[in-house]
Amino acid sequence: VGIFIERSLEMIIGILGILKAGGAYIPLDPNYPAERLTYMISDSRCSILLTQQSLVQFLPPNQAELLCLDRDWQSIANYSQENPINAVTSDNLAYVIYTSGSTGKPKGVMNLHRGICNNLWRLIDAYPLTLEDRILQLTPFSFDPSVWEIFWSLISGTTLVVAKPEGHKDIAYLINLIASEQVTNIGFVPSMLRVFLQQPNLESCRCLKRIFCGGEALSYELNQLFFERLNCELHNLYGPTETAVDATYFQCKPQSNYQIIPIGRPIANTQIYILDQYLQPVPIGVAGELHIGGVPLARGYLNQPELTAKNFISNPFGNGKLYKTGDLARYLPDGNIEYLGRIDNQVKLRGLRIELGEIESLLATHPQVEQTVVILPKDITENQSLVAYIVGKNLSVNPRELRSFLQAKLPVYMIPSAFVILSEFPLNPSGKIDIKKLPKPDQRSIVE
């Protein structure tokens, strides 16, 4: 069942109603382009769409039956209020979330009740809540962190605070909301957490007990900034959509000894394997592809059996499947896992293999660098070169100094040719850095 509703009480009611009826919900963000919505509705073969009268005009043409929660409320209210008989099992679909696909078409990830329930019970066990706790529903419901935001509070009997539509983009609004509603638990991607921590009036957010971070690598510098600005817990979470939100967890500490904050250890009923190209475990400290097994795994991709077979492989170490994440990681001697970036973040420049994450990690240790992204722009000519984008602690960061800094640590072929200094990074709707919106380097950015 598709749900095309802005973040609101009606959105929560719609999701609960779909699940109560034994269906699986498919979040359709009203801010998505019509072409993407058309594909998602067609691919999922939605038979019913829950929406609101004011949003009907933004729906692309489709064959689904429309049910407007505002316009049709009176007829809905006439139905029985008795608890329906529900034959749903742990192996039934709970939701289908569409994520970006390498083919240019989004892929629908089919998540099961057992996976998300495993994650929710893990949250309840690890972070006990009281009746005074309040959880902020901030993430757009088309991204899977929204699932724990909604259901952790509801199954714990605590209060769920629902942010206004697009409220996740308004830091001033969020700070006021946290203070006025006495929010105790909230989730951020690191890019948004950085913006939040840079605000001058964080004293009003002393009600916060825990902040959960995920979706991007958490830097040492941001970890330190967090504990300088806030007096609450910081938890670094990792997990692709294919594993029901989170697969690992790590509680951060001030004065960390880690230059890269680990993603920690697997959650309950979850196995993590770091393997080489032959599906053999790599030694501790050696990088390999991170594979995930256990209860949280999704059923696969909707209507894409070949992609499902490619990414969900037979587990060579036991029963069931392993999900190939495409993420590079390594085990540390203390048993924690360090995330090293995407395997597809590995590029070839003039025949030489380069791990972009290695350059980014080194740049992040420069005292004047706050945030960095390194890319190899597509170029049809032979003149491809690396470009480093920098958000500095001030705008007087010197590109030549950055180049000299890297020259002392990296071979020549790994040194970016251009250093673009920005006041902030462009963000996409999920709060992550939007690579596509980074400006092209100009002549001033090129350092010989």
Image: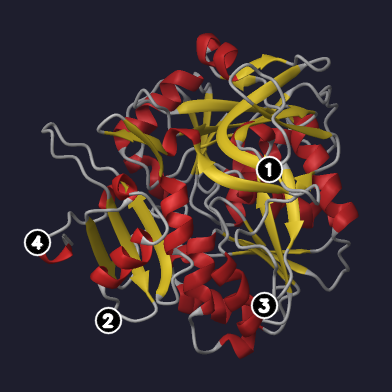
How far apart are the alpha carbons under marks 1 and 4? 40 Å
Q: Position of residue 77 (x, y in %)?
A: 68, 43
Give the answer, above or below, for where 297 lies relative to 379. above
Residue under numbered circle 1: 285
- Image coordinates for residue 148, horizontal then vertical, percent: 70, 50
Asked whether, in this view, residue 415 is left or right of residue 228, the answer is left
Name the amino acid, label 1.
Gly
Q: Nearer the viewer, mark 1 or mark 3?
A: 1
For the residue carrying disc 3, how many other residues have a C-alpha within 10 Å: few (<14), some (14-19), or many (20+)?
some
Question: Residue at position x 34%, y 59% from top?
Answer: 407
- The reply to whether discs 4 and 2 touch (Cβ–Cβ < 8 Å) is no
Q: Please state which amino acid type lies under the numbered disc 4.
A: Gln
Residue at horizontal 82 percent and vertical 52 percent from the top = 123
Q: Quadrant of residue 15?
A: top right
Give SS at disc 2: loop
The residue pinned by badge 2 equals: 396
Query: Closer to the N terminus: mark 4 or mark 3?
Result: 3
Q: In the figure, 318 relative to 357: above or below?
A: above
Mark 1–mark 3 Cα distance, whole angstroms, equals 44 Å
For disc 2, the neighbor class at 10 Å (few under 14, some 14 to 19, many from 20) is: few
| Spatial separation of the CA atoms under disc 2 and disc 1 | 37 Å
Q: Which mark is residue 181?
A: 3
First of labels 3, 2 by sequence position? 3
Q: Secondary structure at mark 4?
A: helix
Q: Pointer 1 and pointer 4: residues touching (CB < 8 Å)?
A: no
Q: CA distance from mark 4 to mark 2?
A: 17 Å
> Percent x, y for residue 73?
59, 45
